Amino acid sequence: MAKIPFKDVKVLVTGATGFIGRHLINALLKEGANVSIICRKNTELDQNVNAYTGDLTNLDFVHKVVKEILPQKIFHLAALVNPSRNMDLLEEILKVNFYGTVNLLTSLKKIDYDSFVFSSTAEVYGDNDIPFQENMPLKPLSPYSLSKSSAEMFCNMLSKSYGYPIKTLRLSLAYGPGQKADRFIPQLVTTLLKNKQFMMTKGEQKRDFIYVEDVIKALIKTSLNRKAKGETINICSGKQYPIKEIANKVSDMLHAKNLIKKNLIYRTNEQWEYCGDITKAKKILNWEPSTDIDNGLKKTIKWYKNN
């Protein structure tokens, strides 16, 4: 009988109550993993999950949890995500995204684990030329991308200098069922489903959207892959679309073309091109996305209609 890689394996997931985290937990439970999570507030999750309520910025709390769980695999998804250019957010975002990562890895120092997957973002590329390649210099344009760049560098130092089994994934813009309506695609879909006007910019900025199921497959493959140790890998669709095209696709699917209003101004330091190269993911992880944008949008719309 074939061995199931995650069967009874102790797995720790941070950011488990977020969009990607919830999808990941469901996948891990189906694989038979023994899942523990750290979450900032009480939330309803599968009863088979061991939940620890607390904050990654509290080192004593993190130490206690890690010592109790003794995880073999860690997925670090927790982050304060806000891609705005608001410098007032800098201190809080660094505290959560950088120092939270430092605290978690510090607490794991004496634990015998075989994989730590750090979820970063393609936002760290900033205004580099496309397609974004992993060896490009980091050019963060916001407090959020700065915090992720800093956390990446810390992970890289521990991996290269001390041999920690850390693997970094730079995710492009994930979308799909169950995402909160504060992101572009779910906000677009839910607004049009309510037959309300959707306000946006002219939508000339291009983005690389990746369906959430493809992200989950990449996370799991990375956790099981020894060749990925010490590597930074793009998890993207490898294609970019002007967001006005995404808006048009969704409005066509919902027969709501007249509800799109393109009159908002662009944000400061707008990122116009955004597309990742997935050559490395194909080579090391044997991964590439299997859901194209049209099918992904159809699945997403179907979920919001039913929920």
Image (cartoon, rainbow, N blue to C red):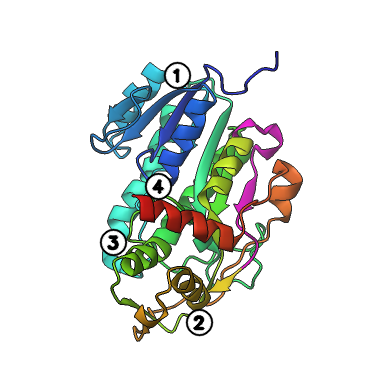
Judging from the image, what secondary structure is the residue with disc 2 in? loop
Using the image as rendered, state which of residue 221 and residue 156 is in the foreground. 221
Which residue is the site of mark 3?
Answer: 89
Using the image as rendered, state which of residue 16 and residue 129 is in the foreground. 16
As for residue 54 lying within the magenta part, the answer is no
Judging from the image, what secondary structure is the residue with disc 4 in? helix
Q: Which residues are magenta?
A: 223-239
Up the image or down, 7 lies above or below 156; here it is above
Q: CA distance from mark 4 to mark 3?
A: 22 Å
Which residue is the site of mark 1?
Answer: 70
Which residue is the site of mark 2?
Answer: 204
Q: Amino acid at mark 3?
A: Leu
Residues at circles 3 and 2 in contact by the CB criterion of under 8 Å: no
Q: CA distance from mark 3 to mark 1?
A: 33 Å
Residue 148 percent coordinates (x, y):
46, 54
Residues at circles 3 and 1 in contact by the CB criterion of under 8 Å: no
Up the image or down, 150 lies above or below 34; here it is below
